[in-house]
Image (spheres, rainbow, N blue to C red):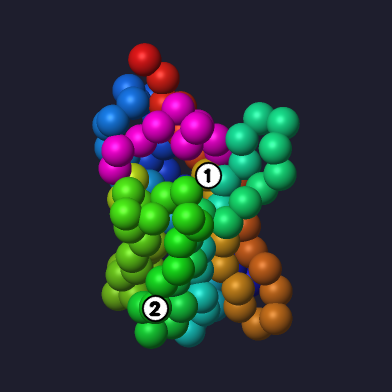
Amino acid sequence: QVQLVESGGGSVQPGGSLILSCAASGGTFSIYPLGWFRQAPGKERELVAKINIIGITNYADSVKGRFTISRDNAQKTMYLQMNSLKPEDTAVYYCWGYYGGMDYWGAGTLVTVSS
C-alpha cells in the first residue's frame, strides 16, 4: 500500500514560482515511477511531468522549460519546481505513483495563478 501526500500549493501572481512536494510512504520508493498531473476546472486530468526510477523525465509541452520534476529517494519525496507561472497553470495538482501493478494518487493541492 502506497500513500502520497502533496504540499506546497497556494496562490501566486503570474510570473511567480512555487515548489510542490509529494511525500510517499509504503512500498519501495526507489523502484516506482512518479509523476504530477493536474486538473483545471471543467477540464480532464492531464499529465504535467513524470520521472522514472533512474531519473529520466518527460514533460507536457505546455510546461517544458518552466517546470522541473525531481525525486529524492532517501527522503521518499518528489518535487515539482514551477517557474514563470501563468494563469492557465491554475489547477489542482495531483501526485501519482505506480507500484505493484497499481496506480496511486494523492488528494491534490490547489495552485492558483492570478493577479
The image position of residue 31, as x and y in percent, is 48, 84
Furthest residue to the top?
115
Q: Quadrant of residue 73?
A: bottom left
Q: Is residue 35 above or below residue 54?
A: above
Q: Residues within 10 Å of mark 2 (few under 14, many from 20)?
A: few
The amino acid sitting under disc 2 is Ile
Relative to 94, 54 lies left or right: left
Q: Which mark is residue 4?
A: none
The quarter of the image holding the C terminus is top left
Is residue 58 highlighted in magenta?
Answer: no
Q: Residue at x 62, y 41 (%)?
A: 39
Whole-percent x and y of residue 56? 39, 78
Q: Is residue 49 above or below residue 114?
A: below
Dot 1 or dot 2: first in sequence order is: 2
Dividing the image into 4 quarters, which one contains the N terminus? bottom right
Residue 8 horizontal side relative to residue 25, left or right: left
For discs 1 and 2, the disc positioned in front in the rendered view? 2
Asked whether residue 110 appears in the rendered view, the answer is no
Q: Measured from the top left, where is residue 77 in percent x and y?
A: 37, 63
- Residue at coordinates 46% horizontally, 61% vertically from top-left? 59
Residue highlighted by disc 1: 93
List the residue tagged with mark 2: 56
Q: Nearer the viewer, residue 72 or 65?
A: 65
Q: Residue at x 48, y 55 (%)?
A: 61
Q: Residues within 10 Å of mark 1 (few under 14, many from 20)?
A: many
Find the magenta span and give its range.
83-92
Tell me the distance, in whole angstroms, between the alpha carbons under discs 1 and 2.
Answer: 21 Å
Amino acid type, label 1: Tyr
- Tell me the element at label 1: strand
Confirm whether residue 113 shows in the render. Answer: yes
